[in-house]
Image (cartoon, grey):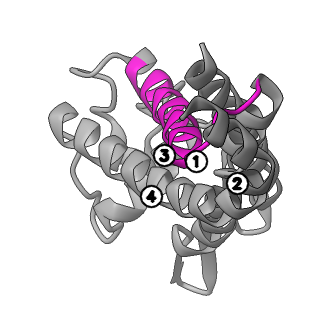
Amino acid sequence: MATNRRSDSGSAVPSALPVSAAIGAAAYVLNYVLVYLFMLVDGVESGGDIPAWKVAGWVFYNAHNVDVTATVGGETASVNYLESAAAGGLTDAISQLTSTVPKLVYYVVPAAVLVLAGLLAARRVRASLSGVEAAGVGAGIVGGYLVLSAIGAFVFEYTVSAFGASASLAPNLASAILVAGLVYPLLLGAIGGIVDTI
């Protein structure tokens, strides 16, 4: 039986990529939900008109080392709310961040989910895989994670206008694509795939 599985591995790897991408998309959603739950445990509430689900999106990207770009009257600044929770102004909504759930958990859990997603993707292939093949299948989660990371940068944007001035907050698009969408799932998914061969 092991011989049959090994002979299927070459053709199974390319056909596994759509499944890997779907697992990557599911990992993105799961990571967002987990960050949202951590915020609820921390007692973070929506700040005024800022929807709590958008605040959770900012923290989700911060957990992937992607800063939120704040633009007020033409001036821009980058903020990571996990590093400076009590930032004031529009960000009063997250002043309780990391008050109960340790900051490290916000960073480690999304990374662990991506490793598990890579492991699951490699396990879905019904063939024995070499380390390189398993890493490739695991890294295939990037397909779904990258697409949702790019879309999320727009979905989680918040803009308000008052008295002729406007302010906006959104995950940095380039970092959302390159760091959260590409580097994180490629690296951690590949690690998960390799773990499956151990």
Q: State the residue position of label 2.
A: 12
Q: Is residue 172 above or below residue 2?
A: below
Q: Which mark is residue 50?
A: none
Q: How many other residues sit within 10 Å of disc 3, few (<14), some (14-19) or many (≥20)?
A: many
- Looking at the rendering, the stretch of residues picked out in magenta corresponds to 105-130
Q: Amino acid at mark 3?
A: Phe
Q: Amino acid at mark 1?
A: Val
Q: Is residue 17 visible?
A: yes
Residue occupying the point 58% across, 47% down: 125
Looking at the image, residue 60 lies above or below residue 103: below
Q: Position of residue 177 (x, y in %)?
A: 77, 56
- Secondary structure of the residue carrying numbered label 2: helix
Q: Are marks 4 and 1 in contact (CB under 8 Å)?
A: no
Tell which of 31 and 138 is nearer to you: 138
- Residue receiving disc 4: 26
Horizontally, residue 85 falls left or right of residue 102, namely right
| Residue designated by label 1 | 125
> CA–CA distance between discs 2 and 3?
33 Å
**Kind of residue sitting beneath label 4:** Ala
Q: Considering only order in the chain, which callout, 1 or 4, is on the residue closer to the N terminus?
A: 4
